[in-house]
Amino acid sequence: MRRPGRRPFRGARRLAAAALLTALAHPAAAGLTPKDLAGVALAPPPDARAPLDAAFTRAADGRGTSLGEAMGGRPTLLMPLDYACRNVCDPMLAVAGTALAATGLQPGTDYRLVTLGFNPRADAGQARAMVAEQLGTGPVLDQAVVLLGSPAPVAAVTRAVGYAYAYDRDTESYAHPAGALVLSGDGRVARALSPLAMTARDLRLALVEAGEGRLGGLADRLVLLCYGYDPQTGVYTPLIRRILTMFGLATVLAIAGLVWWLQRRSGPARSA
């Protein structure tokens, strides 16, 4: 699989900017200047990699853990969230949970869902309640890893993956991109996605790509041959040229197979 560089994330800022319009459709931007808002984006740098040794706390039981332990070496949907945000983070997480449940992949086994709280004022109770309310009951919630941490490790992860947000002191809230990241098992950023436009197909393809051959089946490989990630929209779109090439190759092989079969069939008849 091609490693992500500057080109795959070329449109990430546009994607983040569009999502940011939704994120700022409330007074959260009241005390922020245009310069502050210009820096709010989801734009992973080339070869971005999350620090797996960053230390956090699990909201479920208060146990300390690292990002790497939370991921468990599996492809991971990492969602930075403000657990106190009821405007964007709620629907964003709900859409992501619905899409994950429809991928056909097994949470905890095939992939991990890790949420990372960047609002230090949001406590474990708020985090648990918010995630449970939006994911609903089921395997996705059961296997989700809800993390909280001090500002230093949170900043280390968000900076490394290119997730930038800004605190508005006037409203005591955050302006942040409505975005999520798909990480490979070793923490490398594979894809930047918009959860507000996330589908089960796109999410499955992103996780399969991040799995680097260890996740998914032959059908997924064939779909990935015909679909490509569009960084302008954060979704997978058909690659018409590849599709036509594959259909052309299939046609040639079918004709060759038919000729071979006819030759084999007519051979004994000529001998007789």
Image (cartoon, rainbow, N blue to C red):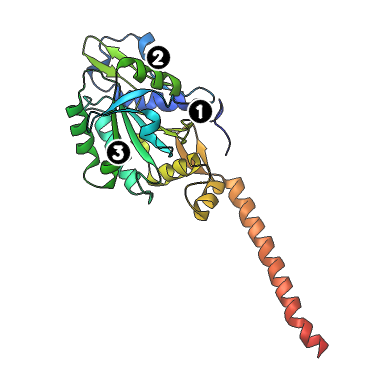
Residue at x 49%, y 32% (from the top left corner): 231
- N-terminal-most mark, 1 or 2: 1
Looking at the rendering, in which quadrant would you find the C terminus? bottom right
Mark linked to residue 9? 1
What is the three-letter code of the residue carrying label 1? Answer: Phe
Q: Are the residues at dot 3 and dot 1 in contact (C-beta closer than 8 Å)?
A: no
- 138 or 164, nearer to the observer: 138
The extreme right residue here reads 271
Tell us which disc is closer to us: 1 or 2. 1
> Is the residue 129 above or below the residue 175 in the image?
below
Q: Which quadrant is home to the N terminus? A: top right
Residue 197, image x, y percentages: 36, 37
User: Where is mark 3, residue-wise?
Assistant: 144
Residue nearer the viewer, 21 or 109: 109
What is the x, y in percent for residue 262? 72, 77
- Does residue 44 appear left or right of residue 120 in this picture? right
Element carrying mark 1: loop
Pinpoint residue 252: horizontal percent, then vertical percent. 69, 61
- Residue type of the residue flagged with mark 2: Ala
Disc sitting over residue 38 in the figure: 2
In primary-sequence order, the first of circles 3 and 1 is 1
Query: Callout 3, which amino acid?
Result: Ala
211 up-or-down from 223: above or below: above
Vertical comparison of 143 with 123: above or below: below
The residue depicted at 22 percent of the width and 29 percent of the height is: 127
**In front of the other: 79 or 193:** 79
What's the distance in space between the residues labelled 3 and 2, CA to CA? Answer: 32 Å
Chain-order first, disc 3 or disc 2: 2
Q: Give the total number of marks visible in the rendering.
A: 3
Name the residue: 37% across, 39% down. 112
